Amino acid sequence: QGLEHLENLTHLEDLSLFNCPLITDNGLKYFSRFSALEKLDLSLCRKITDQGIKYIKDLITLQILSLNHCCITEVGLVY
C-alpha cells in the first residue's frame, strides 16, 4: 500500500516526496487526480524515470516541479 491512499486529496496544492526511495513511476499514476497541485518535489526519488512523467504531464496548475537527481532524460522532458 502506498500512494493510492493520496489519490482522494484532489485539493492538494503542495506535495514534497523529497528523497523517498520507494516512489516509482507506477506510483505517479495516482497524481493525475491532483487537479489543484501547484508545487511538486520529487528530487532524489531515483526510481522516477521518463515513463513516470507521463502521469503528471496534464497537471495544468503545476507551477513548480523539482526532479533533481531523478532518472529523467531529454525524452521525459518532452512530456
Image: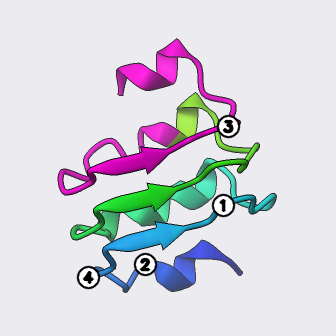
Residue 62 falls inside the magenta stretch: yes
Give me the disc on residue 55: none
From the image, give the main secondary structure of the stretch colored magenta.
loop
The CA distance from mark 4 to mark 2 is 10 Å
The secondary structure type at the circle numbered 1 is loop
What residue do we see at 67% from left, 77% from top?
Answer: 2
Q: Position of residue 58 (x, y in %)?
A: 25, 46
Label 1 or label 4, whichever comes before in sequence order: 4
Q: Position of residue 17 (x, y in %)?
A: 62, 65
Q: Residues under labels 2 and 3: Cα distance?
A: 22 Å
Q: Earlier in the sequence, mark 1 or mark 3?
A: 1
Front label number (4 vs 2): 4
The residue type indicated by label 3 comes to Cys
The extreme top residue here reads 74
Under mark 2, the amino acid is Glu
Give the residue pinned by disc 2. 7
CA–CA distance in space, label 1 to label 4: 20 Å
Q: What residue is shown with label 1?
A: 18
Dot 1 amino acid type: Phe
The residue at the point 70 percent across, 36 percent down is 69
Nearest the eye: 39 or 6 = 39
Crowding near the residue tagged with mark 4, few <14, some 14–19, many ≥20 C-alpha atoms within 10 Å: few
**Which numbered disc flags the more N-terminal residue, 4 or 3?**
4
Q: Are marks 2 and 3 in contact (CB under 8 Å)?
A: no
| Mark 2 / mark 1, whichever is N-terminal | 2
Which region is colored magenta? 53-79
